[in-house]
Amino acid sequence: MQPSRRIRPRRVAALASVTALTLAVGTSAGTGHLTAGTPTATGAGPISLARSSPLGPCMISGRPTVQMSEGVPTARGYARSTGTVRALTLMVDFPDAPGPGNALDRFAEFFPKTQEWFRTSSYGRLDYQARTPISGWLRMPKSFRAYGIERGAPFDPGYRQLVQDIVAAADPKVDFRSYDFLNVLVTPNAGPSALDTVLSVSFAGNMEAPVADGVSVANASFVYSRQDDGSGTYHRTGYRVLPHENGHVFGLPDLYTAEGGGAVGHWDIMSEDWGANNDLLGWHKWKLGWLDASQVRCATGPDPSEYALTPLAGEGGPKLVFVPLDRRSGYAVELRTREGNDETVCRPGVLIYKVDADVDTGMGPVKVHDSHEDSGGCTRSPNVHAELSDATFVPGEEFRDTKRGVRIAVVGADVGGEYRVRVSRE
């Protein structure tokens, strides 16, 4: 089993997304339901590809010491990210922080918006079903303070006790074998405001987690206070902390760093989940099995080659070009437009970013390359890293990595919205 490790906390809580703590994982590939002590495959699309396939050279991987890698395929054991998944969703309160009003109002802060977000992002390939077998507040036997929960808290002892108490309180009405992972929506008056510190966290596949109905409660996301930035958009965007946390359950790492969202900006919800809506990178969609092999191109040849790209938000068509640098890293190329989950795209065009499977979660495994450095960006949307908002490349512009001899040029776009890029190695 991989030992427990803490992910480095964010520097600025109010402008960054939530922390994840991840451990070794175990699920059942047949049903996706949690199974104690049985590590198996994730069921995501790329896992079925052989490394001898045309995409084999682009299936980068990290060393075993990397806790949560950008490698493809995703490590075994995270929750399935395709087909129907069932999220047991419980609303929890405490004697010193009783839930205000109806617990289903707390549920309504996240659903059906979370389901719709995943449906849109996955092109309908993920059928996310949130189940609430207990419609009221699930009262814990201890005060919130007694669990010792604070930012960066490890699983032991506080979260272990909390999960044990949740299981004990819910077990009479819940068959844990019927669900793929657990969402705990904590009453928002427990703990500090999210503007002061973000407590929301995910534990993915902790094989030492408590057992309920014979299965390990290994994959769980906890959401605390409301991520309300005061801009008046909370009713539209406040739910987005949960898709971010569930992204960890599906095996996606944090893309923010200690400096915040400066590496990826608002181009992926695993980087910034405050404020305006945003989608996932094309690399993540391939990693999750939402793109077919036919929609991905692996640019390995020495001769210049042209590739077509259609907008990432739309279903069908070529979506991703990957230029491997070695067996652990490479450049991803995709076309981003203002549609689907991408609310703040102010400069449609080709996004180019480096993916390094050997860099751990929260350490900057992805870096977007800015076509207009130090421009200040083209958006003023609240809680969006503005500098990278105009990072995209448009026809006539090109990216060069002179050290590695890689050149990626945007050579054209047609009236139908398809772009063409040329990849060459010098």
Image: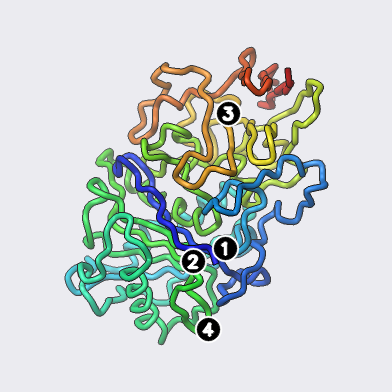
Percent x, y for residue 114? 46, 55
Percent x, y for residue 347? 51, 23
- Label of residue 214 in the image: 4
Find out whether the residues at labels 4 and 1 contact each other: C-beta distance under 8 Å. Answer: no
- Label of residue 219 in the image: 2
Of the image marks 1 and 3, the number of the one nearer the N terminus: 1
Q: Is residue 85 above or below residue 44?
A: below
Which residue in the protein does label 1 denote? 79
Callout 4: SS: loop
Q: Does residue 321 show up? A: no
Of the image marks 2 and 4, the number of the one nearer the N terminus: 4
What residue type is disc 2 on?
Asn
Label 3 or label 4, whichever lies nearer to me, is 4
Res 261 → quadrant: top left
- The quadrant of the rendering that contains the C terminus is top right
Which residue in the protein does label 3 denote? 351
